[in-house]
Image (tube, rainbow, N blue to C red):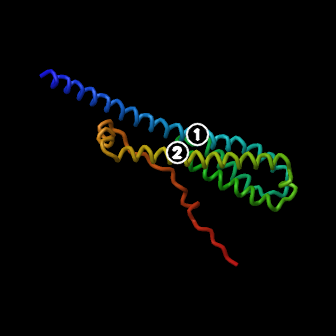
Amino acid sequence: MLWIFWALIALVVIVILAFIMYYNRFTVLNNRIDNSLAQIDVQLRKRADLIPNLINTVKGYKDYEKSVLVQVTKARTAFLDAKDFKGRMKAGNQMQAALKSIFAVAESYPQLRANENFLQLQNELSAIEDKVAYSRQYYNDSILSYNNSSKVFPAKLFFNLYGFKEREYLQIPEEARAVPKVSF
């Protein structure tokens, strides 16, 4: 009889430990996802903070296309005014496209391309773009770990029991998915 009592105690302890372990696991994975979103946001904000310096550097060139500067300024304003992460991501993608326009047009201005401030800003923006790409990849990797944990047994039982929900991956904007047309 005594061994049955100890077996029941051991079973109760194992069940309690399983509840604690799975709750902690999903909480840690959720926190990792939230942290990776925050890191993306930090990099996007750094990029937005560099834009005024870039615009001031470019404004010195009278012939420079003002429409591109307006586009960049609007994209930055949209980013700063965005209320949620999805809005900031959308505005961040617009900002990225606008910045590409600045660098594409800069190819027509050798003096601008040679400007030390412009080159430094271009290098900083390039480094930030790399960090944004890495942060997005880390976010999606965190989502993969989290969602995989929600699908395997017995974690799936605890996942549903605690009311956790699957998370979505960051997606590439539709305009970035388009295959560029090359013609000769």
**Amino acid type of the residue tagged 2 in the rendering:** Tyr
* Rendered location of residue 78, percent (x, y): 61, 46
Which is nearer the N-term, disc 2 or disc 1?
1
* Rendered location of residue 143, percent (x, y): 46, 46
For mark 2, give the secondary structure: helix
Quarter of the image with the C terminus is bottom right
Residue furthest to the top in view is 2
Q: Residue at x 75, y 48 (%)?
A: 123
Q: Residue at x 73, y 56 (%)?
A: 68
Q: Number of numbered discs present?
A: 2
Q: Residue at x 69, y 51 (%)?
A: 72
Q: Residue at x 29, y 37 (%)?
A: 161
* Rendered location of residue 19, percent (x, y): 31, 32
**Amino acid type of the residue tagged 1 in the rendering:** Gln
Residue furthest to the left in view is 1
> Dot 2 corresponds to which residue?
139
Q: Residues within 10 Å of mark 1 (few under 14, many from 20)?
A: some
> Dot 1 corresponds to which residue?
39
**Is there a contact, CB below 8 Å, between mark 2 and mark 1?**
yes
Vertically, is 6 above or below 26?
Answer: above
Q: Seen in the image, is 100 located left or right of residue 156?
A: right
Vertically, is 103 above or below 144?
Answer: below
Q: Quadrant of residue 128?
A: top right
Quarter of the image with the N terminus is top left
Q: Quadrant of residue 21?
A: top left
How far apart marks 2 and 1 lie (CA) works out to 9 Å
